[in-house]
Image (tube, rainbow, N blue to C red):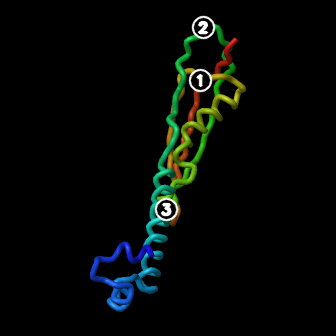
Amino acid sequence: MMLCLLMSPRETPDSVASSGAGITDKERTHKNKMRGTSILSLGLLSLVASGCVSQPLRIPTVTKTSYDTLGEGKGSATGLMLFNFIPIGQNERFVNAYEAAVKSRGGDALLDPVIKESWFWGYILNGYTAEITGTVIKYK
């Protein structure tokens, strides 16, 4: 019934079927493959784009005047670039190094932080190490 409504007045169900106006199984299979490829490509693009997101390193400004100085703190973190394309622990290494430096003395923040970066390489990867040192303080 629905087929009759979509046809022109001169077409009959028999003439539509014999003229080849319908989609063949081969065309339907090709359409399904293209749809699957499009979805896979979109998912892969989303995965790659989300791997490039990182959190910024915010070094807090010490505004309180009452704190105890705990001593020199040091922290480091390493990130890798596999095939010089795939980041592994690369984006958050400065944040991790800062947190490690503060926790090394059990404090709350760093005064006068010094950030040092070094690198190394292998056949299939590059490594980058961030090292942060500073005076650890604990708020009263």
Separation of residues labelled 1 and 3 (CA atoms)? 40 Å
Q: Amino acid at mark 1?
A: Leu
Farthest-out residue, top: 65
Q: Is residue 90 above or below residue 135?
A: below
Q: Amino acid at mark 2?
A: Thr
Q: Which residue is mark 1?
A: 110
Farthest-out residue, right: 106
Query: In the image, residue 4 lies at what x, y percent?
Result: 39, 77
Separation of residues labelled 2 and 3 (CA atoms)? 50 Å
Horizontal placement of 27 versus 139: left or right?
Answer: left
Q: Which residue is mark 2?
A: 65
Mark nearest the camera among 2 and 3 is 3
What residue appears at the point 72 percent right and 26 percent down from the top-left corner? 106
Q: Are marks 1 and 2 in contact (CB under 8 Å)?
A: no
Q: Which residue is mark 3?
A: 44
Query: In the image, residue 137 lies at what x, y percent?
Result: 65, 19
| Front-lying residue, 78 or 8 | 8
Q: What kind of element bears circle 1? A: strand
Q: Earlier in the sequence, mark 1 or mark 2?
A: 2
Query: In the image, residue 96 lies at what x, y percent?
Result: 60, 38
